[in-house]
């Protein structure tokens, strides 16, 4: 999608600190990290929010969690614990309307989140 920031990063038109890519998913470091490890795992397919994902997207979303596990291992946060979070809609804090999964680790997290 032309005016989408994350599509721009995925397509290489906008600079991103990419740490992983395959045919379906791209992962890059969050520009404003909220933890020592803060990576965004982003389906290449433009899906605006989690609510817009269809049954056909469920396999893709499952793949995202496999990538999260792999990146957690690679970035040294698998054993200490990590969080995968999705903000769905502005009310939940979503600011970029291309579905993405936050992989956060390297510090202690409280629950419930703020
Ligand atoms: P959310 O608020 O859940 O939509 O998350 C959007 C995330 O994208 C935020 O954590 C931002 O810090 C991050 N972000 C915004 N612009 C960029 C960018 N150009 N490169 C990497 N991350 C970004």
Image (cartoon, rainbow, N blue to C red):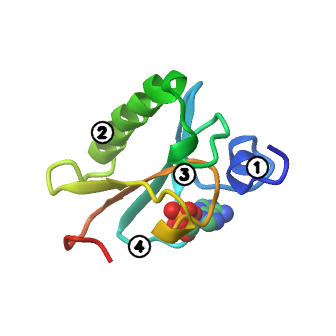
The verdict on label 1 being within 8 Å of ligand 1 is no
Whether residue 31 is visible here, answered yes or no, is no
User: In the figure, is residue 102 to the left or right of 27?
Assistant: left
User: In the figure, is residue 67 to the left or right of 72?
Assistant: right
Q: Position of residue 68 (x, y in %)?
A: 36, 42
Question: On residue 28, which mark appears?
Answer: 3
Tell me the SS state at disc 2: helix
Vertical comparison of 40 with 43: above or below: below
Question: Residue beneath label 1, please?
Answer: 8
Q: CA distance from mark 4 to mark 3?
A: 14 Å
N-term-proximal mark, 1 vs 2: 1
Question: Residue beneath label 2, please?
Answer: 69
Q: Position of residue 17 (x, y in %)?
A: 59, 55
Quadrant in which residue 109 is drawn: bottom left
Q: Position of residue 66 (x, y in %)?
A: 35, 32
Q: CA distance from mark 3 to mark 1?
A: 12 Å
N-term-proximal mark, 3 vs 1: 1
Q: CA distance from mark 1 to mark 2?
A: 25 Å
Vertical comparison of 70 with 85: above or below: above
Tell me the SS state at disc 3: strand
Vertical comparison of 2 with 38: above or below: above
Q: CA distance from mark 4 to mark 1?
A: 22 Å
N-term-proximal mark, 4 vs 1: 1
């Amino acid at each position: 999608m032309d005016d989408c920031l994350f599509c721009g990063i995925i397509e290489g038109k906008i600079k991103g600190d990419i740490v992983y890519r395959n045919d379906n998913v791209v992962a890059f470091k969050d520009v404003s990290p909220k933890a020592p490890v803060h990576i965004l795992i982003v389906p290449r397919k433009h899906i605006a929010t989690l609510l817009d994902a269809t049954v056909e997207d469920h396999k893709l979303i499952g793949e995202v969690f496999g990538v999260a596990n792999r990146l957690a291992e690679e970035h040294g946060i698998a054993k200490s614990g990590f969080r995968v979070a999705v903000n769905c809609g502005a009310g939940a804090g979503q600011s970029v309307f291309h579905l993405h999964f936050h992989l956060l680790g390297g510090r202690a997290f409280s629950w419930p989140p703020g």
